[in-house]
Image (cartoon, rainbow, N blue to C red):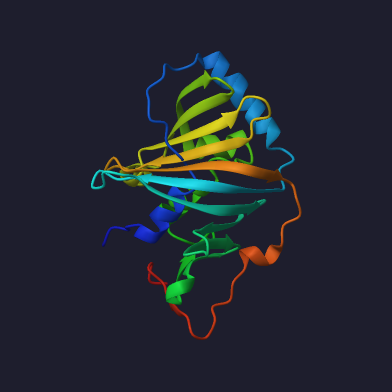
Amino acid sequence: MVPFRPHLAFRQMIARLLIALLFCLPAASRADTNDVLNSWFAAQTNLQSWSADFVQTRTLKTLTQPLVTSGHVWFAAPDSFHWEIGKPARTIARGTGDTMYVVYPMLKRAESYPMGPNTPKQWRDMMSLLQAGLPRNRQDFEKTFRVTAMVQTNDLWLLTLQPRSEFARQMMPELRLDLSTNHFSLTATELVFVDGSRMRSDYKNAQLNAPVDQSLFQWTPPADFKVTQPLGR
C-alpha cells in the first residue's frame, strides 16, 4: 500500500492557522493547566463565528530571512473556514461540509480535498489540526492534542500542543497557541514542522460572532479553472 502523504499546499494552509514561540519557558503546574483549559473551553461555548486579520511569518532553514505576508481568516461553527493569503489574494483555502478547496486565483488553478467522515483517517487527523485554536469542547480537543507545556507571560497564556496522531506528528510534531489572559481569545498560532521550519500567524482586529457571509465558505470552480484532486478521489 502506498503511504498517504499530505500535499504541500495543504501543509502550507494549515501552517497559517498556528504559530510558533521562539524561546523556551518552564511548564505550569497541572492544576493551573486544568483551570486555564476549563476557562478556555468555557469561553468557546457561545462561539458562532470568528474573523481576524493576520500577519504570517514563515521561517525556513534554507532562507536567511523569514517570509512575511498578510491575510484574513473567517471561521463559522462548526467547521466552515476561509483563509486568504496576500493582497490581492494569491492563495485561498475554504471549506465547509464535505469539501475543501485550495484556490490559486492568479494561476486559475484549484485543488479539491475531501472533508467528510468517509475520508481516510490520516487525512481526517490532519484536518482536525485546522481547529486547534478554536476548539468546540474539551473532549474533542483532548482526542486530538496533548498539552505538553503551558506558561503565562505578560497578558498571554502560551500553550504547546502535540498531535496525538502518529501520522500527524510525522509531519508536524508541535503546535503552539497564544491566548489572551483576559478573555481567552486567540492572538497567535504556530505550526512547527518536522524539518524545523515554522509558520506563525499573529492575529489582530478579531471579531467574535459578527455576521459572516456564508458564500465565503462555498465555491464553484469557474469554467476556465483547472481543478485537480491530489488525493485521487
Q: Quadrant of the N terminus?
A: bottom left
> Looking at the image, which is closer to me, 145 or 221?
221
Give percent across and percent down for residue 44.
68, 37
Q: Position of residue 157 (x, y in %)?
A: 55, 25
Towards the viewer: 204 or 168: 204
Specify whether 164 is left or right of 185: left
Residue sitting nearer the eye, 133 or 52: 52
Q: Residue 19's x, y, as percent? A: 45, 39
73 left or right, relative to 227: right
Specify whether 62 is left or right of 17: left
Quadrant of the rendering where the C terminus is positioned = bottom left
52 on left or right of 86: right
150 up-or-down from 197: above or below: above
Residue depicted at 64% across the width and 64% down the height: 216
Is 88 above or below relative to 20? below
- At x 74%, y 47%, the residue is 209
Which residue: 33% across, 46% down? Answer: 171
* Residue at screen point 45% across, 34% down: 176
Please identify the residue farthest to the bottom as the structure is shown: 223
Report how many numbered discs are placed on residues in the image: 0
Q: Which one is in front, 55 or 92?
A: 55
Where is residue 66 shown, x and y percent of the image? 34, 45
User: Outermost residue, left direction?
Assistant: 62
